[in-house]
Image (spheres, helix red, strand yellow):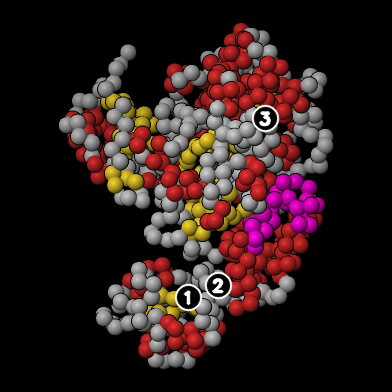
């Protein structure tokens, strides 16, 4: 057996593959071979390593060195300096965003050091396409224990005591769901995995399926034993080709090893699992719609009861859990419920995987103990808001969630506490927004998504979301009127109360939370015709304060319409007849000299040929819009 002095884990997640890691791995293999080091350095293509925005990335063990933004030209340098001379390439080592300092060891990088990995325990540590590597890290031991040492009732009891709640969004206790189904007598039961993951900004389940597909299968085996199921399906959206490929490979390998199929491990227990590729309908993330889709029908929710545990797929007793839920089950069975409950809170035990995205330094995949304050996630793990911008809100729970403002950042991440803010934990999408974001526009964006994805079965969702979207569109385009805010709130409550499924029942959440915490922005749009962030093009005017302008030319260089004019050392100006309100000049200016005024100011400035002689206060006074 080969003994390597170092292992290089090259990120093989979708993001890094798009950035060229397949070519980078090939180049690394070839360079090591050229140096005669191929028997000393082991190179593996693994799953997502977490820091997605810094890709392509790779980790070197046991050195604990993490390289980011690796290019083809860096490979010879890494091999020569690190593996030949023993000196890591410092310019490629991970840096702490807030301090711009190199962090020598991977375990000391705040992004990693503050996480606790359970569902993601094999993240970046194994070759996702090799079952032996999964087995080497205790893989399938929990399944063996469940099948040979535990009864169905004991498995259910362990899951109930663990307090694991479904990680797909609703947060229903997993053990309770299994118990309901286990008590139903029927000749056929089904175990399903929801890998449909449709929230904008969410990539938790995709990353688990790509990095550790066998953990999903093992969790399903244990669940199938608990409820008495002999057939399973993994419902994965077709837009996840890498996840589908690795899951199918894992299924084939598990069958070859006798871990799936008939008489598993000689116990007499049978389970067959298939992959079903969904067409990408967001509503198919709802359990009854997903089951209808699996049956070959249009994915539309049905009324409950009866619940799927009694009458689900093909009207047979069925349990559906999502990918992250299944990833938590093997370590619970192996280590016990008390071990799992050692993290988290009384009602929200264990850990939760989140996908950090948006206006944050460390975009990527994280796993943290439940109960951690949002502030620690945003500023310590996430590295804060980049480019000197100010934090404004974090959208939690995707289009079904809500926007949480800065003054609530000390809220613990639990199902109960997050719900008190008007948002939900959801499946784990966490989108950070800075002061450049218009919250009315944000609400409109998410409602556009849910209105488009509504299956149309029930009128409150089909019609209600469309009417709300029309109102929001009018507000962002300057046609808002008195009473619109109150009308949005009333309609939201009606939709929540009367919609058939979770899509409609939660669709108004982004609107309600933005009104609750950022009502002044709605009022500014309606009453003043002013989007103060410059996002809503019909409601803003960009101009330059000549008293602050340094004539550096930054705004002029980025303007796509050549609307900015001015010579060196002479304050610049914006030609309002050419300006398309793209906001490029505003974002490029480092001296706060580009200003945003109300729509009414645009015509005023067109009539002032000597605009470049006026200062900010003078212009605002003329427009009657002094802040």
Residue numbers of the magenta segment: 493-516
Residue labelled with disc 2: 531
143 vs 180, left or right, is: left
Magenta stretch: includes residue 146 = no
Q: Position of residue 511 (x, y in %)?
A: 66, 59
Q: Residue at x 44, y 18 (%)?
A: 136
Say which of 163 and 574 sits in front.
163
Q: Is residue 567 above or below residue 234?
A: below
Q: Tell me the SS state at disc 3.
A: helix
Magenta stretch: includes residue 503 = yes
Instruction: Kindly check if marks 2 and 3 are in contact, taking CB atoms under 8 A apart as contact.
Output: no
Q: Residue at x 73, y 50 (%)?
A: 505
* The disc label shown at residue 191, or none: none
Residue labelled with disc 3: 174
621 vs 72, left or right, is: right
Q: Residues within 10 Å of mark 3 (few under 14, many from 20)?
A: many
Q: Tell me the SS state at disc 1.
A: strand
Residue 40 shows in the view: yes
Say which of 128 and 219 sits in front.
219
Main secondary structure of the magenta stretch = helix
129 vs 289, left or right, is: left
* Alpha carbon separation for disc pair 2 and 3: 45 Å
Q: Residue at x 32, y 50 (%)?
A: 99
Work out which quarter of the rendered image holds the N terminus and state it. Answer: top left
* Alpha carbon separation for disc pair 3 and 1: 51 Å
């Amino acid at each position: 057996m080969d003994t390597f002095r170092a292992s290089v884990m090259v990120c093989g997640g979708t993001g890094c593959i798009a950035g060229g890691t397949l070519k980078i791995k090939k180049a690394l293999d070839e360079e090591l071979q050229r140096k005669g080091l191929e028997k000393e350095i082991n190179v593996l293509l693994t799953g997502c390593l977490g820091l997605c925005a810094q890709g392509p990335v790779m980790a070197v063990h046991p050195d604990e060195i993490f390289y980011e933004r690796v290019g083809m030209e860096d490979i010879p340098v890494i091999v020569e300096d690190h593996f030949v001379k023993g000196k890591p390439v410092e310019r490629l080592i991970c840096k702490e965003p807030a301090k711009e300092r190199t962090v020598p060891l991977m375990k000391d990088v705040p992004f990693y050091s503050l996480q606790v990995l359970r569902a993601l325990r094999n993240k970046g540590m194994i070759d996702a396409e090799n079952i032996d590597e999964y087995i080497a890290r205790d893989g399938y031991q929990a399944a063996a224990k469940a099948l040979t040492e535990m009864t169905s009732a004991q498995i259910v009891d362990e899951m109930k005591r663990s307090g694991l709640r479904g990680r797909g969004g609703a947060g229903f206790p997993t053990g309770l769901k299994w118990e309901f189904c286990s008590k139903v007598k029927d000749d056929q039961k089904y175990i399903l995995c929801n890998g449909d993951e449709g929230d904008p900004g969410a990539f938790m389940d995709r990353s688990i399926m790509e990095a550790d597909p066998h953990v999903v299968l093992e969790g399903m085996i244990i669940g199938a034993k608990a409820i008495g199921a002999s057939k399973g399906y993994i419902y994965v959206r077709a837009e996840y080709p890498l996840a589908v490929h690795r899951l199918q490979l894992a299924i084939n390998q598990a069958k070859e090893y006798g871990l799936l199929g008939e008489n598993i491990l000689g116990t007499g227990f049978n389970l067959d699992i298939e992959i079903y590729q969904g067409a990408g309908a967001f509503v198919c993330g709802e359990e009854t719609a997903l089951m209808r889709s699996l049956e070959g029908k249009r994915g539309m929710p049905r009324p409950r009861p009866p619940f799927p545990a009694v009458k689900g797929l093909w009207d047979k007793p069925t349990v559906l859990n999502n990918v992250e839920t299944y990833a938590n089950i093997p370590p619970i069975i192996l280590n016990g419920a008390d071990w799992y409950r050692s993290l988290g809170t009384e009602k929200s035990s264990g850990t939760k995987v989140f996908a950090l995205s948006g206006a944050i330094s460390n975009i990527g995949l994280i796993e943290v103990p439940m109960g951690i304050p949002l502030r620690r996630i945003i500023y310590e793990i996430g590295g804060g808001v980049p480019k000197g911008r100010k934090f404004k809100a974090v959208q939690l729970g995707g289009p079904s969630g809500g926007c949480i403002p800065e003054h609530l950042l000390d809220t613990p991440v639990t199902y109960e506490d997050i719900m008190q803010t008007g948002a939900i934990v959801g499946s784990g999408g966490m989108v950070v927004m800075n002061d450049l974001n218009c919250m009315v526009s944000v609400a409109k964006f998410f409602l556009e998504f849910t209105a488009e994805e509504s299956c149309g079965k029930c009128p409150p969702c089909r019609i209600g979301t469309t009417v709300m979207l029309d109102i929001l569109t009018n507000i962002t385009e300057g046609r808002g009127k008195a009473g619109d805010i109150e009308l949005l709130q009333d309609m939201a409550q009606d939709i929540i109360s009367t919609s058939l499924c979770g899509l409609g029942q939660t669709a108004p959440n982004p609107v309600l939370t933005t009104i609750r915490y950022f009502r002044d922005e709605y009022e500014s749009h309606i009453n003043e015709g002013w989007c103060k962030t410059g996002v809503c093009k019909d409601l803003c005017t960009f101009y330059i304060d000549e008293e602050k302008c340094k004539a550096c030319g930054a705004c002029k260089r980025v303007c796509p319409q050549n609307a900015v004019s001015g010579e060196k050392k002479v304050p610049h100006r914006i030609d309002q007849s050419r300006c398309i309100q793209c906001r490029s000049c505003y974002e490029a200016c480092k001296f706060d000299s580009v200003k945003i005024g109300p729509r009414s100011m645009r015509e005023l400035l067109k009539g002032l040929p000597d605009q470049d002689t006026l200062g900010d206060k003078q212009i605002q006074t003329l427009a009657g819009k002094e802040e």
